[in-house]
Amino acid sequence: MVTTRNTTAEDPAEAIRALRQQMEDMRRQHEQELSAVREECAARIAREREIREKGILHPDGVSNGQQAIWCRAFSLSLEGEALEWFNALPAGSIQSFEGLKEMFGRQFAGSRAEDPTVFELSNLRQGKDETLKAFMDRYQKMVRRVKGLNVELALQYVMPALRPGPFKDSVCRKRPKTMEELRERAADEMRVEEMKQAYKKESQESKEKAEGKKPDGSSRMGGFKPREAPRGPKFQQYTPLNAPPARILQEALSVNLILPLKKRPTPAGADGNKHCLYHQNMGHTTEECVTLRD
């Protein structure tokens, strides 16, 4: 039986050529990396040359030595408005690195915000009309800025800071163990709060729209408005209720699904034995209330 050898794989000349190709690839990669380093060094040298040519450093102060290196390194860390300020310094105005720090501090003292303390966090309170979302944003920002604050202490201060309401009751019954749990539970309550606000706004707009369509252009603020005759039901048939109207009304008012009306005076000649919880006057019962049924 005759066998053949793979001369290409075992050819020494081919192996040498492959090795040379690998070395060439490594050389090119090294040149690229070295070129990047050279560019960075050239930029730093150009920056230092620019500083020397501008004559910012005082000739009798920090023109040489470690102080000069610190000043130049400091200038390389600046950007934006701070860099513009440094470039605009008069020639010879820097006498030492300490002097440069003082000049920089005086220039930008108003831009530095003082970090809040644990005492300030303990006094944080949700505003009367502040939404839960706005309060949680304030609370979390302050928690992040208080130095040395642990999670347990941060969670301890959230409950007294909350305005009385469903979310505060929830936190009181079951305290969150982590900030993530607090954020998730707050997010759920925010969705409920936003839904209630949207419904309240929609109801208010509908009410204002209905009041704007009064006959003869009359309004509550001006002119005499004749008393309207009692109106009948809007629909001939209504969906049967699974609970008394008075109970449904009380539950709807407790969760702000409908807005309570101001107490109306009892019409003359009305039946004094009948009381309506919705209109808060006499003349008809809550079960007979046409407005509530509509």
Image (tube, helix red, strand yellow):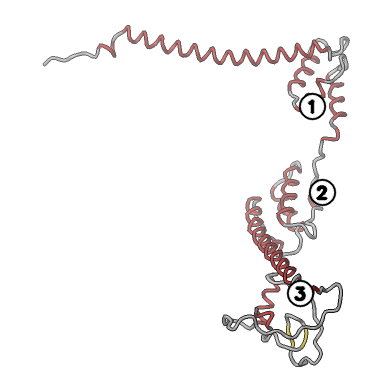
The residue wearing badge 2 is 120
The residue wearing badge 1 is 82
Q: Residue at x 72, y 50 (%)?
A: 137
- What x and y, as percent, mark residue 129? 78, 59
Q: Is residue 138 above or below residue 38?
A: below
Quadrant assignment, res 58: top right
| SS at mark 3 in the image | loop
> Tag 2: Cα neighbours inside 10 Å, few (<14), some, or many (≥20)?
few
Relative side of 161 to 25, left or right:
right
Q: Nearer the viewer, mark 1 or mark 2?
A: 1
- What x and y, as percent, mark residue 214? 76, 74
| SS at mark 2 in the image | helix
Q: Amino acid at mark 3?
A: Lys
Towards the viewer: 162 or 38:
38
Towards the viewer: 197 or 183:
197
| SS at mark 1 in the image | helix
Residue 214, label in figure: 3
| Residue that sits furthest to the left in the current view | 1
Disc 3 + disc 2, Cβ < 8 Å: no
| Total numbered circles | 3
Q: Amino acid at mark 2?
A: Glu
Q: Residue at x 73, y 80 (%)?
A: 278
Residue 32, label in figure: none
Q: Is residue 279 above or below residue 25?
A: below
Q: Nearer the viewer, mark 3 or mark 1?
A: 3
Relative side of 235 to 144, left or right:
left
Relative side of 231 to 65, left or right:
left
Mark earlier in primary sequence (3, 1): 1
In the picture, the quarter occupied by the N terminus is top left
- Measured Cα–Cα span from mark 3 to mark 1: 64 Å
- Measured Cα–Cα span from mark 1 to mark 2: 31 Å
Q: Residue at x 71, y 64 (%)?
A: 201
